[in-house]
Amino acid sequence: MSEQPGAVGSPWSAGVERVADGSVAVAGVRVAELAVRFGTPLYVLDEADLRGRARSYREAFEAAFAQVGAEVDVYYAGKAFLSIAVARWVHDEGLAVDTATGGELAVALAAGVPGDRIGLHGNNKSDDEIAAAIDAGVGRIVADSLVEIARLSAAATTRGAEVPVMVRVTTGVHAGGHEHIATAHEDQKFGLSLAHDDDADSPAMTGLLAVLAAPGLRLVGIHSHIGSQILEPDGFVVAARRVLALRAELAERTGVLVDEVDLGGGYGAAYLPGEVPLDPDRIAKEIAQGVDAAAHELGTPLPRFSIEPGRSIVGPAGLTLYTVGTVKPVRLDGGFVRTYVSVDGGMSDNIRPALYGARYHAEVVGRSSSAAMVPARVVGKHCESGDIVVHDVALPADVAAGDLLAVPVTGAYGRSMASTYNLVPRPAVVAVRDGQARVLVRRDTIADLLALDQG
């Protein structure tokens, strides 16, 4: 591989290695065997790597927050990728599960995750989703608007339940990558803003007061999320200070000091060789020290905290395996030649390059090559010029039809955002561990596509 798998600066999961014949194996299973058994394109999850990342975040945050006298929960972000097996893995490693839809909630429950270890998010929850969450006894529903608070109260009253509610606030702290995944600036759909006129309560404070006054609701905390693909901890500390100040203001006005603050997540992953991801120990210590200092300044005891590492758990644990088809050298202005390498998938199995301009790496993994490296672009089979899997990468000049090519760090948002564009069936998800491979989510078939079509 371009970098030692599992090392800092490597985009590959810890179980990826070049074997004696120059091909690649994942957790002891050669990619050629995976391609023959399961077909391509194929999402491959390194189970031990995913579990290890989940465990490292939990242990790092528990240790760091214990140093300042606070407790913390780590939530796995179901939206990154959720299956019954993955929900079981992260639950085994001591994580709770954050869901954003009724479908994600159903998968977490089917995996046996207890309701009180599940949270439900979403800016536009349906009545059915709210009912399902209440009936499942979820540990918290994150309210996103004043209208939703009223709907939650009505649903709780109808069921004779007391529903634990957090209020999502927008702190004005902008962090992360593409503007489409930044979630704490004012002009967007999520949460209730902290901004207000001098003579009026902020929408965030109005929301907190509404929950306190609403029948059937129990205010358990305040939630903040500032973005995604974040590689520095500074924004979390700034946002936490603002949320803790809101908590203190609410206590001063009502005597209610909420028990929990969720600092969100969106921790970044290293997608390219040489990139350095967030270190769990470092970010945990810096955030814990920051919130401890803020609480001392405000004169309030620390609440319980929760965090959501997001893609940084499942993203690097996965890769997508493709088979190369057409290889086409294209001469550009100035005599520059770029080799276009077409694979048997594309934007239907990884929309992020087309949607966000996301950058990925790729390597030929079915064999070794001593050929010179040439500038290349990995593209898909769809009817779009923007159907690009990897914008710029160096590949061997002898790359040819039938070669196996792998793209790392696709465990997050590959399958979960996949589509059947051009009626291309979605790939299977396979888990590998200790030399064994098994299907977690089967491949779509043409029969599946036709079964949905009512004629």
Image (cartoon, rainbow, N blue to C red):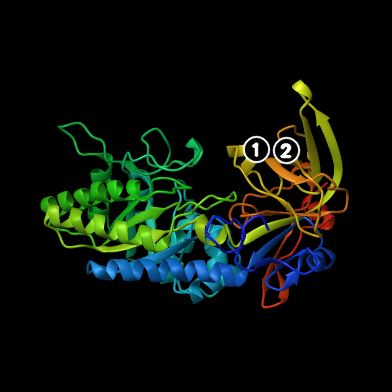
Q: Which quarter of the figure has residue 307?
A: bottom left
Instruction: Say which element carries label 2.
Output: loop
Coordinates of residue 138 in the picture (x, y in percent):
42, 66
Callout 2, which amino acid? Asp
Q: Which quarter of the figure has residue 374?
A: top right
Residue bearing mark 1:
354
Tags 2 and 1 touching, CB below 8 Å:
yes
- The earlier-in-sequence mark between 2 and 1 is 1
Coordinates of residue 148 in the picture (x, y in percent):
38, 48
Coordinates of residue 40 in the picture (x, y in percent):
80, 57
Residue that sits furthest to the top in the current view: 333
> Who is closer to the viewer here, 90 or 97?
90
> Who is closer to the viewer here, 443 or 160?
443
Relative vertical location of residue 3 with respect to residue 17 in this rendering, above or below: above
Could one spot residue 160 in this view of the protein? Answer: no
Coordinates of residue 330 in the picture (x, y in percent):
82, 31
Q: Which quarter of the figure has residue 142?
A: bottom left
- Which mark identifies residue 387? 2
- Which quadrant is home to the N terminus? bottom right
For image coordinates 72% across by 52% down, the residue present is 363
> Who is closer to the viewer here, 135 or 247?
247
For image coordinates 63% across by 41% down, the residue present is 353
Callout 1, which amino acid? Ala
Relative vertical location of residue 69 with respect to residue 165 in this rendering, above or below: below
Q: Is residue 274 left or right of residue 209?
A: right
- Total numbered circles: 2
For image coordinates 55% across by 50% down, the residue present is 274
Q: Is residue 342 left or right of residue 357?
A: right
Label 2 to label 1: alpha-carbon separation: 6 Å
Relative vertical location of residue 157 with respect to residue 58 in this rendering, above or below: above
Could one spot residue 418 in this view of the protein? Answer: yes
